[in-house]
Image: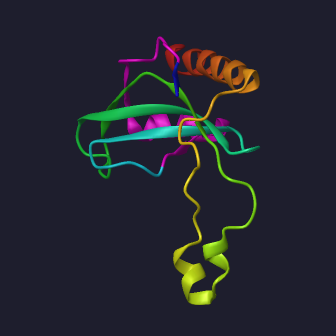
Amino acid sequence: MKELPSKVEGKQFDLYKLEQKLKPIGYSIGGNWDYDHGSFDYKIDDQDGYQFLRLPFTAVDGNLDRNGCTVELGRPFLLSHQYEEGIDEQGTSGTFSGSFNQFQEPTDKDASLSDHALNAGESLVAELESLLLSD
């Protein structure tokens, strides 16, 4: 993980309006959210694992599952998960077992980041600042 300081950190936005700005340029709501916090993820690469720019946020007014929720952005960071190559042997033991073992755990949840991912992350943060702070 590598934090990328940004001018968007600490800024507050209506969650719905924020989604309307970020989704068209490739961000999606990360799967690890709760009623009071979550993140937007931008997939940089999926070669030899996954590299994401993650933009965390916390609810400051309302809950994330309600209209009119205001969120505060946290510090963006780069995240890399490395997966073992090859077939997951547990997933080949039958239909029933395969339905439960279909997702492989990363072999390294904090894998090193390539120069490509670092450069892409810095460019994405600059794009975020331009998009979100130009109003």
**Quarter of the view holding residue 86:** bottom right
Range of magenta residues? 4-30
In the current view of this chain or complex, which residue is farthest to the front?
A: 89
Residue located 49% across and 46% down the image: 30
In the current view of this chain or complex, which residue is farthest to the left?
A: 61
Q: What percent of the width, then of the height, locates residue 129? A: 55, 16
Front position in the image: 3 or 89: 89
The correct choice, above or below, for 72 with respect to 42 in the image is above
Q: What percent of the width, then of the height, locates residue 29? A: 49, 46
The correct choice, above or below, for 85 with respect to 129 in the image is below
The correct choice, above or below, for 92 with respect to 64 in the image is below
Residue 107 belongs to the span the image colors magenta: no
Residue located 37% across and 19% down the image: 11
**Quarter of the view holding residue 68:** top left
Residue located 73% across and 67% down the image: 87
Q: What percent of the width, then of the height, locates residue 57? A: 38, 33
Direction from residue 5 to residue 68 in the image, left or right: left
The correct choice, above or below, for 76 with respect to 104 in the image is above
Front position in the image: 56 or 85: 85
Rendered image coloring scheme: rainbow
Residue located 46% across and 17% down the image: 8
Residue 6 belongs to the span the image colors magenta: yes
Q: How many marks?
A: 0
Q: What percent of the width, then of the height, locates residue 49? A: 68, 45
